[in-house]
Image (cartoon, rainbow, N blue to C red):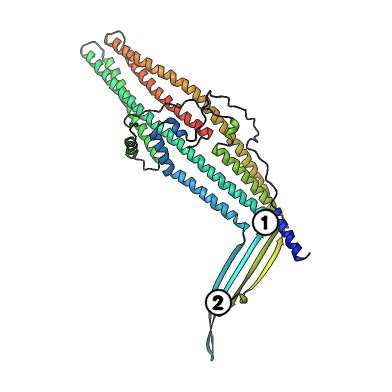
Amino acid sequence: MNHTKWWVLLCLLIFGGGCNTLADRQENDLDVHVPSEWSSLPDSDQPVGHNWIDSFDDPVLSKLVGAAIANNFDLKSTAARVEAAIAQARIDGSGLWPQLSFAPGYQHTQVRSAGFGSAQFSVFEGLFNVSWELDVWGRVRDFRQAAAQEAEAAHTDFQAARLSLAARIAQNYFALQEAKLQTQVAVQSVEDRGAIAQLVQGRFKRGLARGLDVRLALTDLANARSQLAQARNQTQLVTRQLEILLGRYPDTSSLNNALANTASADSTVTVNQPALPAPPRVLAAGLPAELLGRRPDLIAAFTRLHAADARLKSTKKLLLPRIALTAAGGTRDSALTDLIDPRAVVWNIFAGMAQPLFTGGRIRGSIHLNEARVEEALNRYQAVALNAFREVEQALAAEEWLREQEEVLREAVQQTEASQELALYSYRHGFIQILTLLDSYRSTFNAQSAHLAVKRQLLNNRVNLYLALGGGV
C-alpha cells in the first residue's frame, strides 16, 4: 500500500471511528410505575411560577433571598465547584489536540588544559517536540463528553443549591416572623396573668379568696414569664441562623437594621409589626412525568448517568490499538543567529500504533469499575426520582390537612378569647373557681400559639412544595 492510500485509510478511521452511540436512555425509563397524575391532585390551574418567592407578596422576603444568593458562602463554594468542573472538562478534552513543547537552552563550557591554557565554548539550542494521538475510535471524545456532562451536572447542582438556599431563607424568615408573633402573644399572656394575680391578691386582702388561690395565680404568672423568655430566646436563635444564611456575622442588630432599611425603602412594609404572609392559593402540580425534566437534582442525576455511560464507552476502547503521530527536531549552534536559520533545523516525524496485549488486568478492571459506576448512577437516579415523587405527594397531601387544621385552630382562638372574657366575669362574681379562670387563659394562649405554629407550617409546606416541584427563583 502506497503512502496516499495509507493516509486515506487513516482519515476514514479518524472521522468514522467515533460513530458508536451511547446507551439510549430516556428520563422516564424507571423500574417503578409512575402514575399519570398525582394521588393528591389539587383543584387549581395555577402553574409553578418562575420566581415562586414573589407569590408570597412580601418585599422583605424578596430582598433577603436576593441578598442570600449574592452573599451566601455555601452557594459561592458550589459556584466554585462548577468552575472547577468546567476546567476539568477542558483538561480532559485537551487530548484531542496536538501537544507541542519547545525547549530553548544555552550551555557554556570552559576547558582547562595544562600547558595550553583554557578554552571556552558556548552552545545555543532550540528543541521542539510534537505528539498527537489520533482519536480513531473516539475514545478521547467519549472521555471529553463525560467530563462535559459532569460539568453540566455540577451547574445543575448549583441551580439546585440556589433553589434550596431560597427555600431555607423563606422558611427561616417565616420562623422569625412566627417567633416575634409568639413573643407578642407571650407578652400579652404575662400582662393578663399579672392582672389576674393582682385581682386574686386584692380579693384575698378582702377575705374573698383563699391563700391557695394566690399561690396558683402567682405560679401561673411565673409559667407565663418562662414562656416569654423561651419565645425571646427562640427569636434570637432564628435571627442568628438567618444571618448566617445571608453571609453576615450573627449579630441580631445587623439583620434588624437591614429590615429597617427595607422598610424605609418600601412604605408598605412595617418592621415593628411582624406578620406571617397569607398562604398562596392552591397550586397546580402538573404531571409526575414532567417532574423528571424540571427538577434540578433529577436532571443532575440523569446527566451523571450519561457521563458514566460515556466513561464506560471510553474505557472499553482502551482495548483497541492507539495510533499516534510524533515529531521532534531542533538545532544546536554556537551562534545565536544560526539558531533561527530554518535550514539548520533537523527534524523527524514518526507514526506508530500501540496495541495492548497484556496489562495485568488493568484495562479489564477499569471496564468492570466503570460498569459498576454506571449501575450505581442508574440506581441513584431512580432513588432520587422516587424521593422526588414522595416529596411532591407528601407536600400536596400535607397542604390539604394543614389548611383544615389552620381553619379549626382559627375557630379555637375565637372561642377561647370569648370564653376568657366570660371566665373573668364569672370569677369576679364568684360563679367559678380560680382554676377554671386560669385554665381559660391557658387555653387562649395555647390556641393562639398553636394557630401561629400551624400558619408557619402551612407556609413552610408551600415552600417545600415549590422546592419539590423544581420551581425557579
**SS assignment at label 2:** strand
User: What residue lies at 53% left-to-right and 27% top-to-bottom?
Assistant: 284
Does 116 sit above or below residue 352? below
On the question of residue 184 being in view, the answer is yes
What percent of the width, then of the height, locates residue 146?
Answer: 61, 48
Quarter of the figure with residue 196:
top left
- Which disc is residue 291 wearing? none
Inter-mark Cα distance, 2 to 1: 36 Å
Q: How many residues crowd around disc 1 within 10 Å: few (fewer than 14), some, or many (20 or more)? A: many
Does 327 sit above or below residue 243? below
What percent of the width, then of the height, locates residue 246?
Answer: 40, 41
User: What residue lies at 40% left-to-right and 32% top-to-bottom?
Assistant: 58
The residue positioned farthest toward the bottom in the image shown: 115
Quarter of the figure with residue 59:
top left
What percent of the width, then of the height, locates residue 93?
Answer: 60, 54
Whether tag 2 and tag 1 are in contact, CB under 8 A, the answer is: no
**Mark 2 or mark 1, earlier in chain:** 2
Nearer the observer, 319 or 145 = 145
Does 246 sit above or below residue 410? below
Amino acid type, mark 1: Asp
Q: How many residues crowd around disc 2 within 10 Å: few (fewer than 14), some, or many (20 or more)? A: some
**SS assignment at label 1:** loop
On the question of residue 321 being in view, the answer is no
Amino acid type, mark 2: Phe
Q: Quadrant of the N terminus?
A: bottom right
- Which disc is residue 135 wearing? 1
Q: Relative to 358, is 448 on the left or the right?
A: left
Q: Which residue is mark 2?
A: 124
Quarter of the figure with residue 356:
bottom right
What percent of the width, then of the height, locates residue 101?
Answer: 58, 66
